[in-house]
Amino acid sequence: MHWRATSAAGVAAALMLAACGGDDGNGGDANGFMLDVPDIPAHGELGEAEGEVNIIAWPGFVEDGSNNPDADWVSEFTANTGCVVNRRIGETSDQMVTLMRSGDYDLVSASGDASLRLIAGGDVAPINLDLVPHFGDLVDGMKGQIYDHVNGEAYGVPIGRGANILQFNSDAVETPPNSWNVVWEPDSPYAGDIIAYDSPIYIADAAVYLMHHEPDLGITNPYALDSDQLDAAVELLKQQNSLVSEYWALYTNNVSSFQSGTSVVGTSWQVILNVLGDGYDGVLPVEGSTGWSDTWMIAAEPKNPNCAYMWLDWSTQPEINAAISQNFGMAPANALACEGSEENEAHCEIYHATDEDYYANVWFWTTPIEQCIDGRTDVRCTSYQEWTEAWASVKG
């Protein structure tokens, strides 16, 4: 599992979202917004393979067996298509955006905090879904999301998703919690033993809690905060700061913090819980949670568009999507990836892959911008740059 760093300074200037009423059949999007984007055509039809494809991807997404002989879906792809895969590991979303803007890459596995920047900047093209037959098998909950689907067009092919869960040491936390109050409230019995995520995007976690417990603030989307709402979230985060034993960004730090007893409860991922094993548990609390989703996106002017589309369809088919999701630690996007073997079924059950009721309570990472993505037009919302500055004040 990679470190999902999410700095996005200056993104607000590139993004121009305007609220609209919904899908009107003429460019209005089902998610309720229009995005002012460059007019870039989708690839028309599949031609002959160019011989290679250049991909920026998170670790574990594009594997050729060199890291783990049991993880290889690149070799067969190359044998079948003649497209040699040149992979560049992405370290952060900011880096991925910069690399895509170099023009040297055909594809990227973009997280929700990067995809809107790529779309608005004209760095990626709409997807011709006729060239990705397996798209139809994807779970409905990963289609039509604001971070990869705008103005009635898909700009991404979903790969997988995951929730940020409340994890706890079962011995130290005798009564399993069902609320985030054990990490936010000053009277928490676990004060001083709480682990929290180290990123400005964690402000959204505070906003999710406030949505449930302080409805008068009027927060309806944790990524759309006006200045007063941001102030309230920051106040809650500063209150939590005195309760925190450790902030984590690398998942290995989370694992070691729980194993050493430094932390007994806090924000985590299902893949981390799997690594910890017996003696630890996790829940999606009553308030819901934040989460993340990744999507394949194709460059606006790819040098190898045919190989790129061949990869899109190859990696989206159930067998390969299952391999990627199990290797990485997430719910697969293709519902059929949950069939065919006991391993597939067990993995999908653990990650709630086809449970839309579960993910209905998960707010997937989306870059905050000045235009309120909750539909408000009478106020200015805060940008990620403001979140970055606010996070620095929380950490001290």
Image (tube, rainbow, N blue to C red):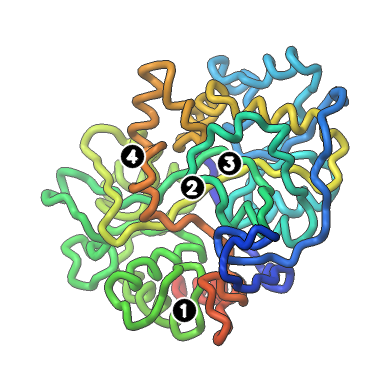
Amino acid at dot 1? Leu
The label on residue 188 is none
Whether 97 is drawn above or below 181: the answer is: above
Residue 223 x, y percent position in the rendering: 50, 68
Identify the residue at horizontal 69%, vertical 60% (top origin).
27
Q: Measure the alpha-carbon separation of dots 4 and 1.
A: 30 Å
Q: What element does badge 2 sit on?
A: loop
Mark nearer the N terminus (4 vs 3):
3
Whether 308 is drawn above or below 269: the answer is: above
Closer to the camera in the image, 63 or 21: 21
Amino acid at dot 2? Leu
Circle nearer the viewer, 4 or 1: 1
Q: Residue beneath label 1, please?
A: 230
Q: What element does badge 1 sit on?
A: helix
Amino acid at dot 3? Pro
Closer to the camera in the image, 140 or 212: 140
Q: Residue beneath label 3, please?
A: 158
Closer to the camera in the image, 214 or 313: 313
Q: Is residue 245 left or right of residue 317?
A: left
Residue 175 x, y percent position in the rendering: 12, 51
Circle nearer the viewer, 2 or 3: 3
Q: Residue beneath label 4, please?
A: 273
Q: Residue beneath label 2, please?
A: 250
